[in-house]
Image (tube, rainbow, N blue to C red):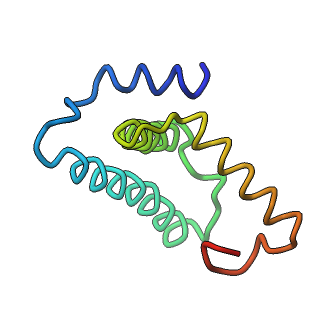
Amino acid sequence: MDLNEYQRAALRTAAPRDKHNEVFHLLLGLVGETGEVAEKAKKIVRDHGSDFSRWDTEDLKKELGDTLWYVAVLADHFGLTLADVAAGNVRKLADRQRRGVLGGSGDDR
C-alpha cells in the first residue's frame, strides 16, 4: 500500500472536514497517540532497563498506525498528500545531511 492509498483509506473513517473543531480534535488525537508511544517507551526504560527488545512490536505497530491515521487526516485537511509530506521530509533531511546539520536544533538549519 502506498502512502496516498493509505490516506484515501483513512479518510473513509474520518469525520467530515466541516465538523466543528475537527482540526483541533485531530491535533489532540495526534498528540495523544504519540504520547501513548512515549508512555510505553517510558515503561521499558523504567521497568526493563531500557531494553527495547522487550517492546511488544505488535502493540507498537497499532499505536504507530493510530498516529499515522491522524497525520493522514490532518494533512488532508490542509490539502496535503502523505506522499508529498514524506517526499518533502526526505528532501529536507537529505539537505541537512549534505550540509552536515542533521544534529542540532532549529527548524531552519
Rendered image quadrant of residue 77: top left
Counting from the top left corner in percent of width and height, residue 108 is at 65, 74
Q: Nearer the viewer, residue 32 or 77?
A: 77
Please tell me whether residue 46 is drawn above or below residue 15 in the rendered image. Answer: below
Counting from the top left corner in percent of width and height, residue 58 is at 52, 36
Counting from the top left corner in percent of width and height, residue 22 is at 20, 44
In the rendered image, the quadrant that contains the C terminus is bottom right
Q: Nearer the viewer, residue 89 or 9?
A: 89
Counting from the top left corner in percent of width and height, residue 87 is at 68, 42
Residue drawn at point x = 41 percent, y = 19 percent? 9
Residue drawn at point x = 50 percent, y = 24 percent? 6
Q: Is residue 63 left or right of residue 89?
A: left
In the rendered image, the quadrant that contains the N terminus is top right
Rendered image quadrant of residue 37: bottom left
Residue drawn at point x = 66 percent, y = 52 percent? 53
Q: Is residue 10 left or right of residue 59?
A: left
Residue drawn at point x = 62 percent, y = 78 percent? 106
Please tell me whether residue 26 is drawn above or below residue 7 in the rendered image. Answer: below
Q: Nearer the viewer, residue 36 or 86?
A: 86
**Numbered circles on residues, count:** 0
Give the residue furthest to the left. Answer: 20
